[in-house]
Amino acid sequence: MKKTAVITGASRGIGRACAVALARCGFDVLINYRIDSQAAETTASICREYGARAFTFCADVSDEKKVREMFDFAERELGGVGALVNNAGVSSDGLFCDISRAEYERVFDVNVWGQVVCAREAARRMVREQCGKIVNISSMWGIVGASCEVVYSASKAAVIGLTKALAKELAPSGITVNCVAPGVIDTDMNACYDKATMDDLCEQTPLGRLGKAEDVAGAVAFLLGDGGDFITGEVLRVDGGFVI
Ligand code: NAP
């Protein structure tokens, strides 16, 4: 497998940590972002410090046309797409009774359709090569469900279904598809919560701390490395024991 990877939503947080972890493991990387080009460029600079070739590409993962252009660019500049980290995602909270169609679509467009489109573009290229590895980022809430995050939880449960079905379909082509389900990770995504809520979540985590983006990136790098060669359809929790 070519050591080249597309990482979506890599301008910050878990996506940035994944890009850096992969660069450290010898991957050349394409850093996808939606808004913050400067932040994406910072990710690329860090990756280059580890000797990787690193490119940035602006694309909303729910935009089919842009995503196709992004994978064409990756193929051209990186010389192929060996791995995909389907990381870009948005959160959503609020009472279930207040959910609107627009909010449902906003969340599912990015968290599910975005992963479908990126995985499809990656798979088309990987099938040609008869090898490749895909890791989809879900959430522990996709396993156990979170109160007041019903649509988000449903979208992350869909990611688990997508992973398992795609793993079966792509295995005969030598492609693995796995899923990482993070617990509470200290990134911008949780910046909306007050200290009391974060302390409470920390207390509910048996390992007694919040996760770091690097904790998730380590699991992703493992699955995309040689250690993941015979693992497919797996849901790997990185949650400090929250969901035991
Ligand atoms: P984050 O800090 O909010 O970063 C989200 C990233 O996704 C940003 O780079 C953002 O780029 C990008 N993004 C959002 N919508 C996009 C779109 N439509 N197209 C392309 N890029 C888009 O979040 P994070 O905590 O690192 O989360 C990363 C993934 O882990 C998500 O799938 C999330 O659901 C999952 N997760 C996180 C936690 C946690 O506790 N943090 C727990 C479980 C699962 P822009 O800034 O350009 O929009």
Image: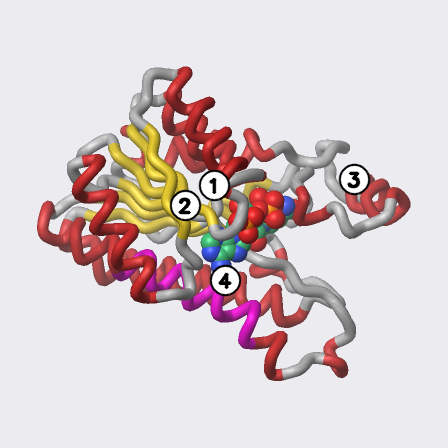
Q: Disc 2 or disc 3, which is closer to the eye?
A: 2
The residue stretch that appears in magenta: 105-120
Residue occupying image coordinates x 17% and y 42%: 76
- Separation of disc 3 and disc 1 at Cα? 25 Å
Disc count in the image? 4
Residue to which mark 4 is pinned: 111
Residue occupying image coordinates x 48% and y 69%: 109
Residue to which mark 3 is pinned: 202
Q: How far across and how far down the image is residue 243, in percent?
A: 65, 49
In primary-sequence order, the first of circles 3 and 4 is 4
Q: Amino acid at mark 2?
A: Asn
Residue to which mark 2 is pinned: 32
Locate residue 229: give its quadrant. Answer: top left
Q: Quadrant of the N terminus?
A: top left
In primary-sequence order, the first of circles 2 and 3 is 2
Residue 118 visible in the picture: yes
Mark 4 C-beta closer than 8 Å to ligand 1? yes
Tags 4 and 2 touching, CB below 8 Å: no
Mark 2 C-beta closer than 8 Å to ligand 1? yes
